[in-house]
Image (cartoon, rainbow, N blue to C red):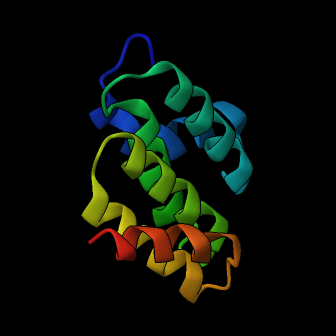
Amino acid sequence: MKTNPSVNAEKLPDFLKKELNNEFSDHAILNRLGYSRLKKEDKPAWALELFKLNVKLFPEDGNLWDSLGQAYLKYDKKEEAIKSYTKAVELGNEGSTKTLIELLKNE
């Protein structure tokens, strides 16, 4: 992440597969890494790309959609946040409901 632009996030699974000699299958790794970057970044970059990649790799995990929504909120991307939280709720992530309701109230 220090030597590559965030647009290279899409290459991460192939890189990890090659380096680990194993299929990348742990959604928690990218989620933790995304939160770590989210705390350090002032503008959208790696954090947002990691969360977007994670929902692409694991689209049925409501918690990951919730994380993506949080990143969108941090970077003032309200419409994208609403879409992410909506998807999280659809997938059964109860914790996203309150945030989604608040966002929709303020529309």
Position of the N terminus, as image quadrant, is top left
Left or right: where 76 falls relative to 60? left
Left or right position of 99 against 44: right
For residue 73, above or below residue 8:
below
Placement of 6 over or under 93, stated as above or below: above
Q: Is residue 82 left or right of residue 12?
A: left
The vertical placement of 84 against 86, above or below, is: above
Q: Quadrant of the C terminus?
A: bottom left
Foreground pick, 34 / 76? 76
Residue 29: quarter of image: top right
Q: Position of residue 77 (x, y in %)?
A: 27, 52
Residue at 47% in and 43% down: 50
Q: Quadrant of residue 45?
A: top left
Looking at this view, name the residue that lies furthest to the top: 3
Q: Nearer the viewer, residue 67 or 23?
A: 67
Question: Residue 46: percent from the left, percent from the top?
Answer: 41, 31
Camera-side residue of 42 and 27: 42
Please give the name of the residue rendered at 40% of the width and 50% of the height, measured from the top-left corner: 73
Q: At 55% across and 25% down in the image, what residue appears? A: 39
